[in-house]
Amino acid sequence: DTGVSQNPRHKITKRGQNVTFRCDPISEHNRLYWYRQTLGQGPEFLTYFQNEAQLEKSRLLSDRFSAERPKGSFSTLEIQRTEQGDSAMYLCASSSRQLRRETQYFGPGTRLLVL
Amino acid sequence: AQKVTQAQTEISVVEKEDVTLDCVYETRDTTYYLFWYKQPPSGELVFLIRRNSFDEQNEISGRYSWNFQKSTSSFNFTITASQVVDSAVYFCALSEPSNNNDMRFGAGTRLTVKP
């Protein structure tokens, strides 16, 4: 068990470009979450998956954002036509519903800077 | 509405002092979960504790202890004999089944422990 991993760790892009982040959860975890954290704030929930189904999306997730988890394992978060306000740390977490001790374990995050 | 309030934005103590981080939450659920996470300067959120709303026993783990008071909707975290390595931002979070178990984080408390 290597924990939750995220790639890339850092991304610098120009406004208007598209970016995609990847999250690999802990292998036996069937729930996967995406959060966004801006400087000086706590993480804000964006969306979550149970297996491959996306069960909830926050209002923070505008139509420029899309997340997928095609095989119920890794997930991708894409931001289209990036804006400077998208600059933040994007965190992924995973948990296991079956264990009935549903604690979310976080990855190291992807730090996005939109110039 | 703010679900989790961490009123202390920043705390500074000298090594070996005890320090308590406050957390007050709001929920209408009878079953819910409370968490504390540590975010050191490296940025990765580190899970510290998960507490079920039905379990009001206080918990101690080494120098860490947690005081759960349902009557005041508080879940405070105390570090005894603080060390420089405890310097981090600490987040309290709430998870509610009525909210798909999404975690709602407080704004965090930045703890600085000076040698």
Image: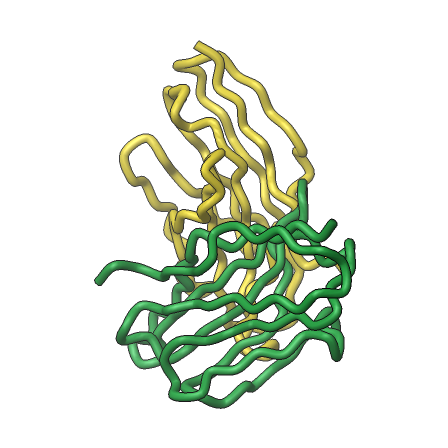
Q: Is residue A32 above or below residue B111?
A: below
Residue ranking furthest to the top: B115
**Does residue B83 appear to the left or right of B97 in the view shown?**
left
Q: Is residue B15 above or below residue A75?
A: above
**Does residue A12 appear to the left or right of B35 in the view shown?**
right
Residue in the image at 37% along x and 69% along y: A24
Residue in the image at 38% along x and 88% along y: A71
Residue in the image at 57% along x and 19% along y: B12
Across and down, in percent, residue B53 comes to 47, 63
How many numbered marks does the figure carry? 0
Residue in the image at 54% along x and 35% along y: B21
Chain B colour as displayed: yellow
Q: Is residue B73 visible?
A: no
Q: Is residue B38 visible?
A: yes
Q: Nearer the viewer, residue A6 or B95?
A: A6
**Figure quadrant of the N terminus of chain B:** bottom right
Across and down, in percent, residue A81 comes to 75, 69
Across and down, in percent, residue A2 comes to 25, 59
**Does residue A78 appear to the left or right of B57 in the view shown?**
right
Q: Is residue A54 above or below residue A99?
A: below
Colouring style: by chain
Q: Nearer the viewer, residue B1 or A96?
A: A96
**Figure quadrant of the C terminus of chain B:** top left
Which chain does green denote in the image? Answer: A
Across and down, in percent, residue A28 comes to 27, 76
